[in-house]
Image (spheres, coloured by chain):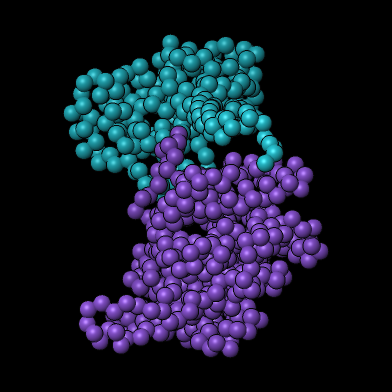
Amino acid sequence: MSSHIEPAGHPLLAEVNPVAIPRQELVHHGRDFHWITEKVCGIVEAKTPVWWWWCFGVAAFVASFTVAGLIYLVGTGVGVWGHANPVNWAWDIVNFVFWIGIGHAGTLISAILCLLRQKWRTSINRASEAMTIFAVVCAGIFPVFHVGRVWMAWYLFPIPNANYIWQNFRSPLEWDVFAVSTYGTVSVLFWYVGLLPDLGTMRDRFTAAGNLLKARLYGFFAMGWRGSNRHWANYEMAYLILAGVATPLVLSVHTIVSFDFAVSLIPGWHTTIFPPYFVAGAIFSGFGMVMTLMLPLRAIYRLEDLITQYHIDCMCKITLATGTMVGYAYAMEFFIAWYGANPYEGFAFINRAFGHYAWAYWIMITCNVITPQFFWSRRVRENTTLVWILSIFVNVGMWFERFVIIVTSLARDFLPSSWGYYSPSIVEIFTFFGTFGVFSVLFLLFIRFVPIMPMSEVKAVIPQADPHGTGH
Amino acid sequence: MSKIFPKSANALPLQIVLFIVVLAGVATAAVTYYATPKYLRIGYEPVQPVPFDHSLHAGQLGLDCRYCHASVEKSATSSLPAAQTCMNCHSVIKPASPLLAPVRHSYETGEPVPWVKVHVAPDYVYFNHSVHVTRGVSCVECHGKVNEMTTVYHAKPHSMGFCLDCHRQPEKFLRAPRDVYNLDSPTLAAQGKMDEALAQIHQWKVKPPQSCSGCHR
């Protein structure tokens, strides 16, 4: 903050005049503590808006498609999905990886940006973490129901049983079980610990308003939070530890998901670039989804003072960076396929770009490589509607990336005699379509009943939180 | 701030944790005891159309198992006897017994006696009788002491763990070939002849599968 630096040592230093770049303002219009509390709590305390009921109805209707698809699947058998030799993994794992990937932005924002002291995370981290949890819920549906006898899904975990069924710990699918369940657990804990002070605030406000039922409800979940110094000291330490625990998960979960493929020998899967490429893709898709969710919220609840243009710029830039990494990985896969001189590997990539699934490949390239490049332009980043549309393209592109990787490689493996073409069945389409409803139902419940921003953290980044005014 | 919870609520978190721990413990114990084949299968003793007494035929009279279950050495399944087999003796012994009416009916019409199956292997399990009995796995290992049963009942759990116990260490369960149908004989290991059991395993290349596809084909 201070623009004047005392020269020490060499006299030349006296002539050096560093440019003072002002810190970006994270809350506009000099909003104070009270305004932030009223704004964030007001969303929960206000009467349920009409648009919310409409959205909730539509989301619940869409979610019923998943329920219908799953009931039919359990009642009939996994054969109702479109899988058949040679494509025995298809939409189920495509959708699993798609949803798991989306979750990664939430963890990145809450954990890595916390450790790196990126203060712009404060107004978007709560909603992003919620998005992570709901995305993990949607992701979990697919592998759990793909086991067929879904009531036996607990066989995924090493629980001693009368049948002596024991897991193959050399299988990356088993690593996946641990990676995803750890990820889900830590995400929920992180989200919940961060919620405690705000739940305490909600409890006190409902108590003051005389709504004892809601006061008790929020009070129960606030676990006796009173905001004492000791509470805050413990809270800050717990949050920091959880941030430390969650940080490796940002990298490890999608690395292990990529092992599902990279550890196999299928051409197009068996590549060492997969872990970093998958992680970059996951963060890319996650930020796409964060923007898809936050920009409408910002408009509906007039949150422009809290989610500023600077926040949008930051998210766009991360999307641009990770999208470009993904584009680099696409190019490098082709280079290695040529440089490695393995005819099967070479064919797998030529086939991706020009084979039966070329349409999917070029949708992927368009959405994932070209879309983020628009974010170089400040004018694009400042056009919220355009950013929102581009963020949807990112989501679509990342779904197609998983589809291209998984289906093209399986449909055309080593033996031409076993080649095939995969199309999803109506049951799969129902199940996947419905997960958007499941996600939306959960997210709508979240914005209705939980403060969508961590009030205390947002308050900490405004100038009033700095009594000495020195920036230290 | 006014109170919204009574003072007793302070103990609630601990109480909830304790409740969950106790509940989980009870549920685990209950499932382990009540929901496993050791409880669910053992003791199943259906009423049969003819009160055939194994302890009389196989025990006191000393009939060989294979006299009735003739295909056990040759086939994946152990056959049930046709009424003809029963009538070999019962045409002259107790030929008019009312208890044997279903057997005589079967003999005259060719319709099988509707025996109730006691040991049911699920359709996703491939089990071959002949490969077991011809390598020294006695009937008694899976069916118990049938030669002492008045009515046949399920004596062993037949869970996958039960199969794997033997597949992992067959030397502890094998008998000499001559003792396979002698349900009162001890295993080689029980006789202290472990070297003989190991020699048998080596000679016959006994390699019980432990992979999934060994039995779930």
Instruction: Report the number of discs.
Output: 0
Compared with residue A62, is residue B59 higher up or lower down, i.e. above or below?
A: above
User: x, y percentage for residue A70?
Assistant: 65, 55
In the picture, which quadrant includes the C terminus of chain A? bottom left
- Residue drawn where x is 53% and y is 84% of the image: A375
**Residue A305 in which image quadrant:** bottom right
Which chain is rendered cyan in the image? Answer: B
Give the colour in which the image draws chain A.
purple
User: x, y percentage for residue A83?
Assistant: 55, 64
- Residue drawn where x is 34% and y is 30% of the image: B137
Depth order, front residue of A35/A91: A35
Is residue A66 something that shows in the picture?
Answer: no
Depth order, front residue of A75/B95: A75
Depth order, front residue of A239/A166: A239
In the picture provided, is A151 more to the left or to the right than A15?
A: right
User: x, y percentage for residue B96?
Assistant: 62, 12
- Residue drawn where x is 24% and y is 19% of the image: B191
In the picture provided, is A382 more to the left or to the right than B137?
A: right
- Residue drawn where x is 47% and y is 23% of the image: B155
User: x, y percentage for residue A113?
Assistant: 45, 66
Compared with residue A99, is residue A320 higher up or lower down, i.e. above or below?
A: below
In the picture, which quadrant includes the N terminus of chain A? bottom left
Depth order, front residue of A297/A133: A297
Compared with residue B148, is residue A40 higher up or lower down, i.e. above or below?
A: below
Is residue A313 something that shows in the picture?
Answer: yes
